[in-house]
Amino acid sequence: AIDEAEDEWSQHDAKKLIDTSLKGGLRNSIPKNFPYFHVEFGLHKGFVHVIDDETNFKSGLGLDVIRGMLELPEEDMHRRRQYGSLETQKNDVLRFSRDWARFDWTRELD
């Protein structure tokens, strides 16, 4: 999905995907204060692309990446989107945060 979207939000012929494991992680792979799209596989392997033109960046790219990984047809990703009550959503966020804590790479930023 990143490769397919590349032409829509990149203006330069720079390297398309940057392997974050080659430079010691995300923070060392992109210039400071640049917009980017990042996909990580595990704690030490991922790809990042600096977004040259934010106005052409489609916010649904992350969903497209997940859809591609799950090999779902495009229409399935949107048709199945259902929202629970606000209380249910809050509980889901708390449960996810608790379960995700051991994988949370942002703890390395502090």
Image (tube, rainbow, N blue to C red):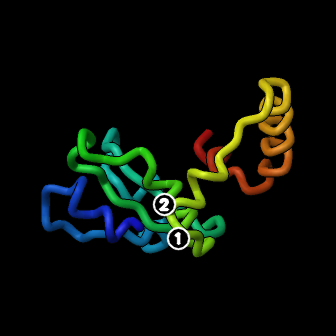
Disc 2 element: helix
The one nearer the camera, 57 or 52, is 57
Q: Is residue 88 above or below residue 45?
A: above
| Residue 102 in sight from this viewpoint | yes
Label 1 Cα neighbours within 10 Å, binned few <14 / some 14-19 / many ≥20: few
Labels 2 and 1 touching (C-beta < 8 A): yes
- In the rendered view of the protein, which quadrant contains the C terminus? top right
Q: Amino acid at mark 2?
A: Asp
Label 2 Cα neighbours within 10 Å, binned few <14 / some 14-19 / many ≥20: some
Residue at position x 53%, y 60% in the image: 75
Residue assigned mark 2: 64
| Residue 45 in sight from this viewpoint | no
Residue at position x 41%, y 61% in the image: 48
Question: Percent x, y for residue 87?
Answer: 84, 25
Q: Amino acid at mark 1?
A: Gly
The one nearer the camera, 87 or 53, is 87
Residue at position x 49%, y 71% in the image: 21
Residue 55 shown left or right of residue 104 in the figure: left
Residue assigned mark 1: 68
Residue at position x 70%, y 42% in the image: 82
Disc 1 element: helix
Residue 107 shown left or right of residue 67 in the figure: right
The one nearer the camera, 66 or 11, is 66
